Image (cartoon, rainbow, N blue to C red):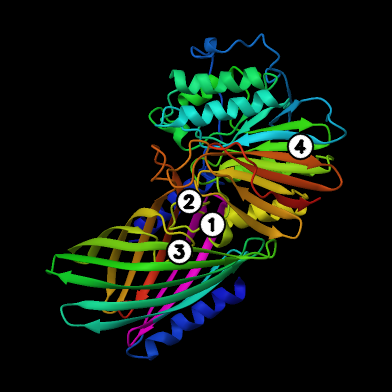
């Protein structure tokens, strides 16, 4: 018995040394080349190939806010390229992009339905957005982007769009006074490494407007939509820890998808998570895209649009 | 933490004086997505179908709860429990569980399974609202006995000795060794999966290991 106890203590010590957290640290190591990226012409205006490394996070400067100090950009999620009926909604979204002059598009993940980034539908959607949004396509990884190939396609595809060795799954995009942080919570968890990066980057961020984007809804229950443990962040520590980080660093908004229902979760008077309905749409609710309008020093406005009618719905407003 | 350990030692000394009550005292290590929680210490007291639990992890969290199992024929028990906790910097939560379990015992081999529904409430000082979650609570355990040892291989959504929010599938192994009549020690560990429904990868969200002492047979 004494030997067993000694063996246990030794095992515990070894395991303790190994841990800190066993969640993935999102390495981009070993990713070289990109056999799929030829489908997209990177000589176009896309500026995502440039950026700087700050505390492990990729920072991509996008220039100054236009249109009288306001920043307006479209956001979509859950494209599920290749899924039945997706093309009509994509076409409607393309028309919307063509009618406006947006600096970039954000997609909150599940671009691909099965994680295959060699498919025409997936590549076509990305290139379609690039062509219509100044070559700027911001993306977060979703759980479907891990299907079949466990994110290998996603990583290799998008690694061509960030400097060598950087992580395509997390990043910070700076657009004038607006900082947009994309996170990887595609496995319904962040990991302490990622949240540590985020907290440090936010702490050094002097921009007055900070927005988080990720795929999986951070909240669950309440007005963010019902949950039967299938959506939302699984670990209560993580969920509450990110709330603390958002509070202490004045993050105003988190945009997420995944849930397919959409909804507004009020965190506090000046902080919210807005969960977006998918672009591909459900039979009973149709597809949606959104615009996010930042009025620095005043408010954030998130407006839903119906893919079927192109009409705007009732917006949500978050004071800054 | 020292005070808490002191209480446990005191109870460990006094409990044998109280026949009919069993006790389970453990300490271990847990790592999850948010970080590591060294030396979670827990104590369980059981008697007359009731089990009370108190847990503390480092100086950062404390939790406690009460469960009750009402015995029915055919080795069936109806279970209800409430468990609540608070972690410094992470907020608090409360879990409620109702369900039933059934135990089979063939001497060298035992089988236990249970079904239930778990509801979780969570509150943070950094959010105005309360989160909630509903999860199925399932468990199955295979027990192999080779005197003085017993080996329990179990799978479950969630685990009775960990503070929970949303229950996730986990797999564990517990080895008990009887050191004297009414006294045993054990080592218990598990790994728990993160996302498993909507992603093709199996990610270990958390793992934990503990050693414990049981007086009077435990639950």
Q: Which dot marks residue B75?
A: none
Residue B213 on image: x %, y % = 38, 71
Host chain of mark 2: A
CA separation, marks 1 and 2? 7 Å
Which mark sits nearer the N-terminus, 4 or 1?
Answer: 4
Q: Which dot marks residue A231?
A: 2
Residue B12 on image: x %, y % = 44, 80
Marks 3/2 same chain: no
Residue B200 on image: x %, y % = 38, 37
> What residue is pinned by disc 4?
A179
CA separation, marks 4 and 1? 25 Å
The answer to which quarter of the image holds residue B109 is bottom left
Q: Which dot marks residue A220?
A: 1
In magenta stretch: residue B37: yes
- Whether residue B55 sits left or right of residue A243 in the image: it is left
Which mark sits nearer the N-terminus, 4 or 2?
Answer: 4
Marks 1/2 same chain: yes
User: Are discs 1 and 2 less than 8 Å apart at CB?
Assistant: yes
**SS under mark 2:** loop
């Amino acid at each position: 018995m004494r030997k067993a106890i000694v063996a246990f203590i030794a095992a515990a010590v070894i395991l303790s040394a190994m841990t800190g957290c066993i969640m993935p640290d999102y390495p981009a190591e070993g990713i070289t080349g990109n056999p799929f990226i030829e489908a997209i012409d990177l000589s176009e205006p896309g500026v995502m190939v440039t950026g700087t490394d700050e505390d492990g996070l990729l920072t991509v400067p996008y220039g100054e806010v236009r249109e009288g100090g306001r920043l307006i950009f479209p956001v979509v999620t859950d494209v599920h390229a290749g899924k039945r009926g997706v093309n009509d909604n994509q076409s409607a979204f393309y028309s919307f992009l063509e009618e406006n002059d947006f600096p970039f598009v954000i997609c909150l993940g599940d671009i691909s339905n099965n994680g295959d980034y060699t498919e025409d539908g997936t590549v076509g959607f990305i290139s379609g957005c690039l062509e219509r949004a100044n070559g700027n396509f911001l993306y977060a990884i979703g759980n479907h982007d891990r299907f079949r190939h466990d994110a290998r396609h996603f990583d290799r595809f998008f690694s061509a769009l960030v400097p060598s060795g950087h992580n395509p799954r997390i990043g910070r995009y700076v657009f004038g006074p607006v900082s947009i942080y994309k996170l990887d919570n595609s496995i319904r968890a962040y990991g302490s490494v990622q949240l540590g990066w985020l907290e440090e980057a936010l702490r050094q961020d002097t921009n007055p407007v900070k927005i988080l984007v990720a795929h999986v809804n951070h909240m669950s229950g309440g007005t963010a939509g019902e949950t039967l443990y299938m959506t939302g962040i699984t670990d209560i520590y993580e969920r509450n820890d990110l709330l603390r980080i958002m509070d202490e660093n004045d993050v105003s908004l988190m945009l997420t998808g995944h849930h397919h229902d959409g909804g507004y979760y009020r965190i506090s008077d000046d902080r919210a998570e807005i969960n977006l309905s998918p672009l591909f749409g459900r039979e009973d609710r149709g597809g949606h895209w959104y615009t996010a309008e930042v009025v620095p020093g005043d408010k954030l406005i998130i407006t839903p649009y119906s893919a079927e009618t192109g009409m705007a719905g009732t917006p949500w407003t978050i004071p800054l | 933490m020292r005070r808490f350990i002191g209480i446990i030692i005191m109870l460990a000394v006094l409990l044998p004086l109280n026949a009919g009550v069993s006790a389970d005292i453990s300490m271990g290590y847990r790592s999850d997505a948010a970080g590591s929680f060294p030396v979670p210490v827990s104590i369980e007291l059981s008697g007359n179908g009731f089990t009370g639990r108190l847990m503390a992890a480092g100086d950062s969290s404390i939790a406690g709860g009460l469960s009750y199992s009402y015995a029915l024929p055919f080795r069936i028990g109806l279970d209800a429990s409430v468990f609540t906790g608070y972690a410094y910097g992470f907020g608090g939560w409360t879990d409620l569980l109702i369900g039933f379990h059934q135990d089979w015992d063939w001497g060298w081999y035992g089988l236990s399974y249970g079904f239930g529904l778990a509801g979780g409430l969570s509150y943070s000082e950094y959010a105005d609202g309360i989160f909630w979650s509903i999860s199925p609570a399932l468990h199955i355990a295979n027990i192999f006995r080779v005197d003085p040892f017993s080996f329990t291989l179990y799978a479950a959504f969630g685990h009775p000795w960990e503070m929970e929010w949303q229950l996730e599938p986990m797999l564990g192994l517990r080895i008990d060794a009887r050191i004297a009549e009414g006294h045993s020690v054990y080592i218990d560990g598990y790994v728990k999966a993160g996302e498993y429904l909507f992603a093709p990868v199996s990610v270990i969200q958390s793992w934990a290991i503990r050693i414990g002492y049981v007086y009077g047979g435990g639950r």
